[in-house]
Image (spheres, coloured by chain):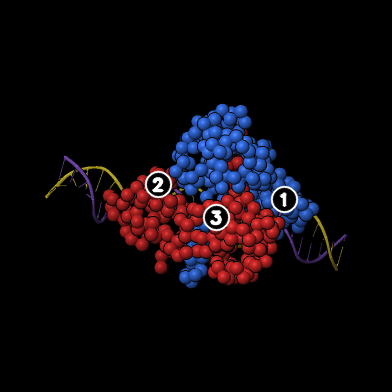
Chain colours: A red, B blue, C yellow, D purple
Amino acid sequence: MKAQLSKNQIRRLPDYLTYLLKKEDEKVEFISTLQIANDLSLNSEQVKKDMQAISTSSGIPNKGREVKKIIKDIQNILGYNENHKAILVGCGSLGKALLNHNGFKDYNLEIVAAFDNNKELIGKTINNIPIYNIDDLKEKRRSHDASIGIICVPSNQAQGVAIRLVASGIEAIWNFAPINLDVNDDVIVSNMNMAQSLASLAHRLYIKKNNIKE
Amino acid sequence: MKAQLSKNQIRRLPDYLTYLLKKEDEKVEFISTLQIANDLSLNSEQVKKDMQAISTSSGIPNKGREVKKIIKDIQNILGYNENHKAILVGCGSLGKALLNHNGFKDYNLEIVAAFDNNKELIGKTINNIPIYNIDDLKEKRRSHDASIGIICVPSNQAQGVAIRLVASGIEAIWNFAPINLDVNDDVIVSNMNMAQSLASLAHRLYIKKNNIKE
DNA sequence: TAAGAGTCGGTAAAAAAATACCGATTAGAA
DNA sequence: TTCTAATCGGTATTTTTTTACCGACTCTTA
């Protein structure tokens, strides 16, 4: 068993993956860590370390690593080899956007059902995904055999939805509400926090405008 | 001038901020680092360090810190005190969702204009935000005096849009396309990467399902 | 077939981040 | 008014992450 990857390393994996998939598309067979680093604007030693950490095979001196193999290793680590089914709660503007987003299949993630409490939406479909009454969460979660719950409701409802998702037997929650969810430790929570990346931008903009030395 | 905050610390600030704004709303005047840590599921020493790093004032033993003061300090660090104007390029499902999202004003971010190359959208408005022809980017950027550009176009168009944004005089880019943008160093880029947070979730789910010891 | 450049793997050093500890201080209860 | 528990500020330690270095190997090309 290879050493565990750090959180930061996990975060970098999808960047490597999209990059390498593009390279594969361009019929590139081998690639060096240095080139990856240059193209992704990363430190080359860091990329080398990352590649060593995720690789199940060796690189070839003066040639690099096999693109296909790295891709396979990353996909394996991220569990993108097996299909994940998800249900989405909250069909507001963000929820709708996610339902219409077809890019998730690159990650083998499939949204199989959506939920809302708005009577006008219930019974309809968005992008062929059925919208159910939130009260049927447990039953529909079961019948669709979904393991991931996506929370797209306003902050003040998020915790309540989280509790219902856990009760319905969900294993992981992808939370788009800007709030810390309190759930049992055996449920995986990953927060999609727009405020975080906006904060990074705003802070750097502030530093730039005020000419603060960094 | 106080010491610079680390990237991770900057990332945590918005979490503190939303949390503290809620507390302020609940008329809480003072709060201890320990309570913040408990409520946000963070290590208390880490929170203490963070608070010391951002605070311009002292805490009071056996009482804690003044909620209003911490909020002010964070907002100041993140530059949320002054208004930021942004333009958005790409009015697909994600772009539309962002245009309809009214939560940005909490961060003093205002989307003042949108752009697309779809003739059917040009001239219309979404959530009172006008949609212009992408060819008018430079002129409209100027007239609206926007400093931030939000990229919501597909990956293969993102780099091109980035170049046009920079040429139009933008200072910072908030990039929602899953690709590494190559722009001049004096332009700030912050990536909003859904794949990253999904990767974290997928990886942990994989570990859980395969009973790998962590 | 030999020289040379590029890249690797592994280890070592440096830097950054997280965590722990401890004496000092203060609010609030007895 | 005194005692106690909570919390602070500051410093020290540990852990993690990043970056640097170096000898070895293999592809390329002259």
Q: Does dot 3 land on a helix, a strand or a loop? A: loop
The residue at which mark 3 appears reads as A127
Q: Is residue B73 visible?
A: no
Q: Residue at x 79, y 53 (%)?
A: B27
Image quadrant holding the C terminus of chain A, namely top right
Labels 1 and 3 in the same subunit: no
Residue A146, position as x, y percentages in the image: 55, 66
Labels 2 and 1 in the same subunit: no
Q: Residue at x 49, y 53 (%)?
A: A103
Distance between the alpha carbons at the discs numbered 2 and 3: 38 Å
Label 1 neighbour load within 10 Å: few <14, some 14-19, many 20+: some
The mark lying in front, picked from 1 and 3, is 3
Q: Amino acid at mark 2?
A: Ala
Label 3 neighbour load within 10 Å: few <14, some 14-19, many 20+: few
Q: Amino acid at mark 1?
A: Leu
The mark lying in front, picked from 2 and 3, is 3
**Residue B170 horizontal side relative to residue D7, left or right:** left
Q: Is residue B102 visible?
A: yes
Residue B18, position as x, y percentages in the image: 68, 51
Chain letter behind tag 3? A
The residue at which mark 1 appears reads as B21
Q: Are marks 2 and 1 in contact (CB under 8 Å)?
A: no
The residue at which mark 2 appears reads as A37
Q: Does dot 2 land on a helix, a strand or a loop? A: helix
- Name the N-terminal-most of marks 2 and 3: 2
Q: Residue at x 43, y 63 (%)?
A: A81
